[in-house]
Image: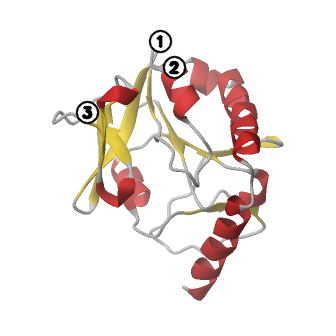
């Protein structure tokens, strides 16, 4: 547990020193790579995240693709991550943990083709270290879907601590590469 705390603190410090313009430029590189993947091109319904200030920025990508694909965003209810349709940045509300989520009552129950996942850190075995609440892991236990982790290069580490309930991703994409 201490290793997770130390990694979260170290990555947070690195992100705070990272200029906003560089964050967006590197996010653009990551999402350009995603757009080249057949798995993305063939996907109709994609679960994304509306980025917080300390995450790889997603707002431009969500806006762009919401015109031609069904984009979903997570919404936290109790200990569970639900999924709601994204329609516009004007129709978001601040949910639990400061995460922006669609201001809708309707929960999406259909098929999700692809999930683009944030994280604090990732490793070469495609383990993900999140914020520690387990929302994505519980969601992945119930939903068999292609999982793509996205991050800055400095967030991809040799190893991150994991436990038996942590679910590995399928692909990790950073500005410098696609790791399958």
Residue 49: where, in percent of width, then height? 46, 41
Q: Residue at x 55, y 51 (%)?
A: 53
Q: Is residue 34 above or below residue 130?
A: above
Q: Return the residue found at the far top.
A: 68
Locate residue 159 relative to residue 89 in the image: left or right.
Answer: right
In whole angstroms, how far apart are the C-alphas of marks 1 and 3?
Answer: 18 Å
Q: Which residue is mark 1?
A: 68
Q: Return the residue found at the far left.
A: 105
Q: Can residue 180 be seen in the rendering of this structure?
A: no
**Secondary element at tag 1:** loop
Of the residues tagged 3 and 2, which is closer to the observer?
2
Locate residue 138 relative to residue 53 in the image: left or right.
Answer: left
Q: Quadrant of the N terminus?
A: bottom right
Q: Give the mark, 3 or 2, whose residue is nearer the N terminus.
A: 2
Badge 1 vs badge 2, beta-carbon distance below 8 Å: yes
Q: Return the residue found at the far bottom.
A: 2
**Secondary element at tag 3:** loop
The residue nearer to you, when weighing 72 against 63, is 63
Disc assigned to residue 13: none
Q: Is residue 127 above or below residue 60?
A: below
Q: Can residue 143 be seen in the rendering of this structure?
A: yes
Tag count: 3
Residue 172: where, in percent of width, then height? 68, 47
Q: Which residue is mark 2?
A: 65
Residue 5: where, in percent of width, then height? 58, 80
Q: Residue at x 41, y 65 (%)?
A: 134
Q: Which residue is mark 3?
A: 108
Q: Give the mark, 1 or 3, whose residue is nearer the N terminus.
A: 1
């Amino acid at each position: 547990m201490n290793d997770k705390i130390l990694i979260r603190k170290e990555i947070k410090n690195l992100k705070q020193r990272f200029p906003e313009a560089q964050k967006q430029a590197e996010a653009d590189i990551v999402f350009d790579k995603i757009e080249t993947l057949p798995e993305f091109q063939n996907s109709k319904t994609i679960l994304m995240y509306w980025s917080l200030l300390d995450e790889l920025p997603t707002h431009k990508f969500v806006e762009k693709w919401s015109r031609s694909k069904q984009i979903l965003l997570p919404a936290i209810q109790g200990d569970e991550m639900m999924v709601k349709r994204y329609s516009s940045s004007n129709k978001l509300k601040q949910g639990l943990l400061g995460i922006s989520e669609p201001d809708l009552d309707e929960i999406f129950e259909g098929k999700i083709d692809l999930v683009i996942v944030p994280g604090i850190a990732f490793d070469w075995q495609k383990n993900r270290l999140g914020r520690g609440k387990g929302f994505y892991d519980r969601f992945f236990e119930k939903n068999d879907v292609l999982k793509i982790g996205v991050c800055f290069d400095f967030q991809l580490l040799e190893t991150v601590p994991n436990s038996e309930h942590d679910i590995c991703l399928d692909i990790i994409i950073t500005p410098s590469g696609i790791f399958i």
